Amino acid sequence: MVHDLLWIPSALFLSYWLRFNLDNLPAVFQQTLLKLIIFALPLQGGIFWYSGLYRGLWRFASIPDLVRIVKASLCGTVVLICVSALTTRLVGVPRSIFFLYPLILTAGLSLSRIAYRWYKDHHLSFRERTGLRTVVVGAGRAGEMLVRDLNHRKGYQAVGFVDDNKNLHGREIHGIPVLGSIAKLEEIVHCLNGELILIAIPSADSRLLQKIVDQCTRIGLPYKTLPSVFEIEEGGISIEKLRSVTLEDLLGREVIEINHGAVAAYLAGKVVLVTGGGGSIGSELCRQIAVQKPDMIIIFESSEYNLYSVEQDLQREFPQLRIKPILGDIKDEDRVFWTFGNYLPDVVFHAAAYKHVPMLEFNPAEGVRNNVIGTKIVAEAADRFNVERFVLISTDKAVNPANTMGATKRAAELYCQNLDRRSETCFITTRFGNVLGSTGSVVPLFQRQIEAGGPVTVTHKEITRYFMTIPESVSLILQAGSMGQGGEIFVLDMGEPVLIKDLAEQMISLSGFEPGRDIEIIYIGLRPGEKLYEELLHESEGLQPTSHEKLLLARSREVDWAWLQEKMICLERAASSRNIDKLRACLQDVVPEFRRNGLR
């Protein structure tokens, strides 16, 4: 502040001096200069303070600070003109002074700050820098902010950028050269004797990140990345934001645009019931629904611990939200109907299901009781209590199913689609593939095997699966729920299928090991009911685009309602009596495309 106050008389004196061609000031003008200084010091100083000029640090002076200086100088000039006009009628005051004064004052205040920041930013260049020789991938805004932060830290020495923008090649950012494209990363790192690689491209999609990670793996140096644009909160980019690359980064960083207005339109202020609300998909559904400000969320869950966990998480994140944790099983008709009758939900997301393929091959009756009969009970409750929307969470394994799990989910789809034609409730089905990190998925299994030192077990060299992250899949489920009019099957665009062998190798590499040398991969053969690849669409369903590029629409299959009701009774009796032969025969009738172990 003292510095700025000293610049006020200095700027006025220099203005007069320039006005008189750097010559001595006449005596009469010396008196008006003195009066202006007396007026300007308190007035301009007060404006400096009021404008927030001293809330920022010179160390981080930037464009917003320059804007404040310009505004304060101009405002002070206007006030000074008014005061001078009232007190002296501007007699003996050259008019050019009021033009020169704000220019000189702005220059004086700004240049001082710029010089101080330059000194602080570059004082390390006056002595030899030490620390890990760091190569930064990405010379955009994020890379610039990251290097600026690195320059103020001990232990890091930024030595070069790589970026695919050819216009940046040969340029410097904070004194650090941009040396070439990402394709030349390995060559550049070796030339610079690099010791650390930092990936500063928050907007990178999974393909670009995979390309960079592959090179980093070949180079053999440690590497870290900035999170995606969705994870970085306001407050700038710094080294604390860096983290290890995760499997979700490599498979699920693609930006998915959601129509939040349409989602909020059918969830805000509503009573929403989520079955299986304590599971991986169900709990994320609860979190994303809570953001839409519903009137109440009813969490229906059979696991006491999972129910407790998700309830505690929601209460902590959304303290104003009304939450009803219901401990119950969807196979318990009395409990389900009691829940619907007491809370009258407007929207239902049915995520409760048994989904482990080999487990249901050994326990088919339980799979039918839960996935088919349990869905039937919940759907009938939704119909009886006039639920507005019922969203069934299905799976790609329901298409041309080769296992009991897929066949039970397909039977559940058929029941909901055909019930829709006889109900005021809109029954909507969403179908997608594997979800990274969900309960029972291959990823936690591989992680446990890697932590144990291997081997990692893969069923077949050519087996592929579709993958999506939990937040992405749930966002699309909510979007589909807003688009459905009843009876539709929405198929989520899962991108390209992933070789499970490649997935295992990526997880081993991300854990800091070399596949085949540190951790062995062994192939154990397909498990009962397992297919080499999954499909998202049956050939008879067709495929139509929707207003959302990531959601496709499949045609539903209409069957005779009386016949379907009869088959549901058959399935329920066979499951209750554990008559597996009769159960499979009945399931085959309902799902004729079901080919268990490759046979009808």
Image: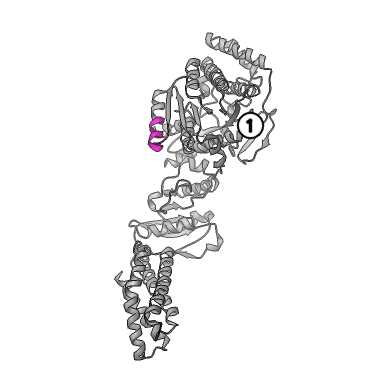
| Label 1 Cα crowd, 10 Å radius (few <14 / some 14-19 / many 20+) | some
173 vs 213, nearest the viewer: 173
**Residue at image point 40% right, 65% down:** 65
Number of numbered labels in the structure image: 1
Residue assigned mark 1: 485
199 vs 235, nearest the viewer: 235
Magenta span contains residue 318: yes
In the current view of this chain or complex, which residue is farthest to the left? 2
Is 172 left, or right, of 539 in this rendering? left
Q: Which x, y percent locates residue 595?
A: 63, 20
Residue 532 appears in view: no
450 vs 272, nearest the viewer: 272
Which contiguous range is marked in magenta?
310-320
The image quadrant where one finds the C terminus is top right
The image quadrant where one finds the N terminus is bottom left
Is 443 left, or right, of 482 in this rendering? left
111, above or below 545, in the image: below
511 vs 168, nearest the viewer: 168
Q: Which x, y percent locates residue 428?
A: 60, 29
**Residue at image point 64% right, 40% down:** 547
User: Label 1 amino acid?
Assistant: Gln
> Element type at marker 1?
loop
- Residue 396: quadrant of the picture: top right
Magenta span contains residue 272: no
Q: Which x, y percent locates residue 184?
A: 52, 56
170, above or below 539, in the image: below
